[in-house]
Image (tube, rainbow, N blue to C red):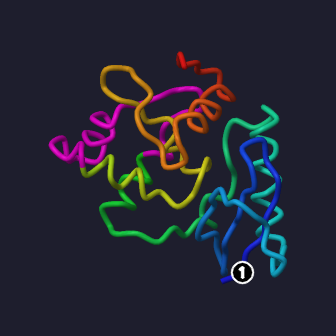
Amino acid sequence: MKYGFFESPLGIIKISYEEKIRKIELVDEIDENSEENDLFILFKNQLLEYFEGKRTSFDHLELLDPKGTAFQKSVWQALLKIPYGKTRSYKEIAKAIGKPGATQAVGTAIGKNPILVIIPCHRVIKTDGSIGGFAYGSQIKRRLLEIEGINFPS
Protein backbone atom coordinates (compact mmCIF):
# COMPACT_ATOMS: atom_id res chain seq x y z
CA MET A 1 0.00 0.00 0.00
CA LYS A 2 1.26 3.46 -0.91
CA TYR A 3 0.14 6.68 0.67
CA GLY A 4 0.51 10.42 0.52
CA PHE A 5 -0.43 13.28 2.83
CA PHE A 6 -1.54 16.87 2.54
CA GLU A 7 -2.73 19.67 4.79
CA SER A 8 -6.42 20.53 4.57
CA PRO A 9 -8.74 22.86 6.49
CA LEU A 10 -9.75 19.78 8.52
CA GLY A 11 -6.19 18.75 9.35
CA ILE A 12 -3.78 16.28 7.75
CA ILE A 13 -5.37 14.01 5.16
CA LYS A 14 -3.81 10.68 4.25
CA ILE A 15 -4.71 9.02 0.94
CA SER A 16 -3.87 5.30 0.78
CA TYR A 17 -3.81 3.60 -2.61
CA GLU A 18 -2.59 0.75 -4.72
CA GLU A 19 -3.99 0.69 -8.25
CA LYS A 20 -7.03 2.54 -6.87
CA ILE A 21 -7.84 4.67 -3.83
CA ARG A 22 -8.43 2.46 -0.79
CA LYS A 23 -8.75 4.98 2.00
CA ILE A 24 -8.93 8.73 2.64
CA GLU A 25 -8.69 9.66 6.31
CA LEU A 26 -7.65 12.29 8.80
CA VAL A 27 -4.43 11.53 10.66
CA ASP A 28 -2.33 13.23 13.32
CA GLU A 29 0.98 13.40 11.49
CA ILE A 30 2.69 13.07 8.12
CA ASP A 31 4.79 9.94 7.59
CA GLU A 32 8.03 10.70 5.77
CA ASN A 33 7.64 7.53 3.66
CA SER A 34 4.84 9.04 1.61
CA GLU A 35 4.66 8.65 -2.14
CA GLU A 36 2.76 10.98 -4.45
CA ASN A 37 1.80 9.63 -7.87
CA ASP A 38 -0.76 10.85 -10.43
CA LEU A 39 -3.63 9.04 -8.68
CA PHE A 40 -2.81 10.72 -5.36
CA ILE A 41 -2.46 14.14 -7.01
CA LEU A 42 -5.79 13.76 -8.86
CA PHE A 43 -7.74 13.17 -5.65
CA LYS A 44 -5.69 15.63 -3.57
CA ASN A 45 -6.49 18.40 -6.07
CA GLN A 46 -10.20 17.51 -6.17
CA LEU A 47 -10.37 17.57 -2.37
CA LEU A 48 -8.57 20.92 -2.18
CA GLU A 49 -11.04 22.35 -4.73
CA TYR A 50 -13.91 21.02 -2.61
CA PHE A 51 -12.52 22.67 0.53
CA GLU A 52 -12.15 25.96 -1.39
CA GLY A 53 -15.80 25.77 -2.46
CA LYS A 54 -14.85 25.33 -6.14
CA ARG A 55 -16.04 21.71 -6.50
CA THR A 56 -19.46 20.21 -5.77
CA SER A 57 -18.86 16.72 -7.18
CA PHE A 58 -15.93 14.39 -7.65
CA ASP A 59 -14.65 12.84 -10.85
CA HIS A 60 -13.16 9.39 -11.48
CA LEU A 61 -15.17 7.57 -8.81
CA GLU A 62 -14.31 4.35 -10.63
CA LEU A 63 -10.84 4.80 -9.13
CA LEU A 64 -12.20 4.29 -5.61
CA ASP A 65 -11.83 0.79 -4.16
CA PRO A 66 -12.87 0.86 -0.50
CA LYS A 67 -12.67 -2.47 1.29
CA GLY A 68 -15.83 -3.66 3.03
CA THR A 69 -18.64 -6.18 3.05
CA ALA A 70 -21.26 -6.29 0.30
CA PHE A 71 -23.72 -4.59 2.66
CA GLN A 72 -21.25 -1.82 3.54
CA LYS A 73 -20.49 -1.24 -0.15
CA SER A 74 -24.23 -0.97 -0.92
CA VAL A 75 -24.56 1.69 1.78
CA TRP A 76 -21.51 3.58 0.49
CA GLN A 77 -22.91 3.48 -3.05
CA ALA A 78 -26.16 4.99 -1.75
CA LEU A 79 -24.17 7.77 -0.07
CA LEU A 80 -22.61 8.68 -3.41
CA LYS A 81 -26.12 9.53 -4.66
CA ILE A 82 -26.73 12.21 -2.01
CA PRO A 83 -26.35 15.56 -3.82
CA TYR A 84 -23.94 18.24 -2.65
CA GLY A 85 -25.59 20.54 -0.12
CA LYS A 86 -28.33 18.02 0.74
CA THR A 87 -28.77 15.57 3.59
CA ARG A 88 -30.49 12.23 4.04
CA SER A 89 -31.43 10.35 7.18
CA TYR A 90 -30.09 6.95 8.16
CA LYS A 91 -33.64 5.68 7.64
CA GLU A 92 -33.76 7.09 4.09
CA ILE A 93 -30.48 5.35 3.25
CA ALA A 94 -31.84 2.06 4.63
CA LYS A 95 -34.90 2.42 2.37
CA ALA A 96 -32.73 3.37 -0.61
CA ILE A 97 -30.79 0.10 -0.38
CA GLY A 98 -33.98 -1.95 0.02
CA LYS A 99 -33.46 -2.69 3.72
CA PRO A 100 -35.93 -0.39 5.50
CA GLY A 101 -35.52 -2.18 8.84
CA ALA A 102 -31.74 -1.95 8.83
CA THR A 103 -31.32 1.64 10.05
CA GLN A 104 -28.89 0.68 12.81
CA ALA A 105 -26.82 -1.52 10.48
CA VAL A 106 -26.75 1.35 7.97
CA GLY A 107 -25.40 3.63 10.72
CA THR A 108 -22.68 1.10 11.50
CA ALA A 109 -21.72 0.80 7.81
CA ILE A 110 -21.61 4.59 7.47
CA GLY A 111 -19.31 4.75 10.50
CA LYS A 112 -16.89 2.40 8.72
CA ASN A 113 -16.75 4.44 5.51
CA PRO A 114 -13.04 4.52 4.59
CA ILE A 115 -13.26 7.33 2.01
CA LEU A 116 -13.63 10.66 3.83
CA VAL A 117 -15.55 13.44 2.03
CA ILE A 118 -15.77 11.79 -1.41
CA ILE A 119 -18.15 9.10 -0.10
CA PRO A 120 -20.20 11.71 1.75
CA CYS A 121 -21.17 10.09 5.05
CA HIS A 122 -21.16 13.62 6.52
CA ARG A 123 -24.44 14.23 4.62
CA VAL A 124 -26.32 11.65 6.72
CA ILE A 125 -28.22 13.00 9.71
CA LYS A 126 -30.72 11.68 12.22
CA THR A 127 -34.40 11.34 11.30
CA ASP A 128 -35.25 14.10 13.79
CA GLY A 129 -33.03 16.51 11.84
CA SER A 130 -30.18 16.59 14.36
CA ILE A 131 -26.61 16.24 13.14
CA GLY A 132 -25.92 12.67 14.28
CA GLY A 133 -22.56 11.00 14.73
CA PHE A 134 -19.38 11.11 12.70
CA ALA A 135 -16.17 9.09 12.88
CA TYR A 136 -14.08 12.26 13.26
CA GLY A 137 -16.46 14.04 15.63
CA SER A 138 -19.36 16.41 15.24
CA GLN A 139 -17.15 19.51 14.73
CA ILE A 140 -15.58 18.03 11.58
CA LYS A 141 -19.00 16.90 10.33
CA ARG A 142 -20.40 20.37 11.01
CA ARG A 143 -17.47 21.95 9.11
CA LEU A 144 -18.03 19.71 6.07
CA LEU A 145 -21.73 20.53 6.04
CA GLU A 146 -20.93 24.26 6.35
CA ILE A 147 -18.69 24.01 3.27
CA GLU A 148 -21.80 22.78 1.46
CA GLY A 149 -24.01 25.55 2.85
CA ILE A 150 -25.75 23.50 5.55
CA ASN A 151 -25.60 24.93 9.07
CA PHE A 152 -26.37 23.14 12.31
CA PRO A 153 -26.44 24.88 15.70
CA SER A 154 -23.46 24.09 17.93
Q: Is residue 23 above or below residue 53?
A: below
Give the camera-side residue of 24 and 20: 24
Q: Residue at x 44, y 53 (%)?
A: 77
Task: Confirm whether the magenta stretch covers residue 100.
Answer: yes
Horizontally, residue 133 falls left or right of residue 80, namely left
Residue sticking out furthest to the left: 101
Residue 26: x and y in percent read 65, 56
Residue 142 image-quadrant placement = top right
Q: Is residue 35 above or below residue 81?
A: below
Amino acid under disc 1: Lys
Task: Confirm whether the magenta stretch covers residue 74.
Answer: no
Q: Is residue 57 above or below residue 114?
A: above
The residues colored magenta run 79-104
Q: Is residue 94 above or below residue 112?
A: above
Q: Residue at x 75, y 38 (%)?
A: 55
Residue sticking out furthest to the front: 28
Residue 64 image-quadrant placement = bottom right
Q: Residue at x 30, y 26 (%)?
A: 127
Classify the position of the N terminus by image quarter: bottom right
Residue 44: x and y in percent read 79, 57
Residue 32: x and y in percent read 84, 77
Residue 10: x and y in percent read 72, 44
CA neighbours of label 1 inside 10 A, class few (<14), some (14 to 19), many (20+): some
Q: Residue at x 25, y 39 (%)?
A: 95
Q: Secondary structure at mark 1?
A: strand
Classify the position of the C terminus by image quarter: top right
Report which residue position mark 1 lands on.
2
Question: Exactly how many numbered labels are in the figure?
Answer: 1
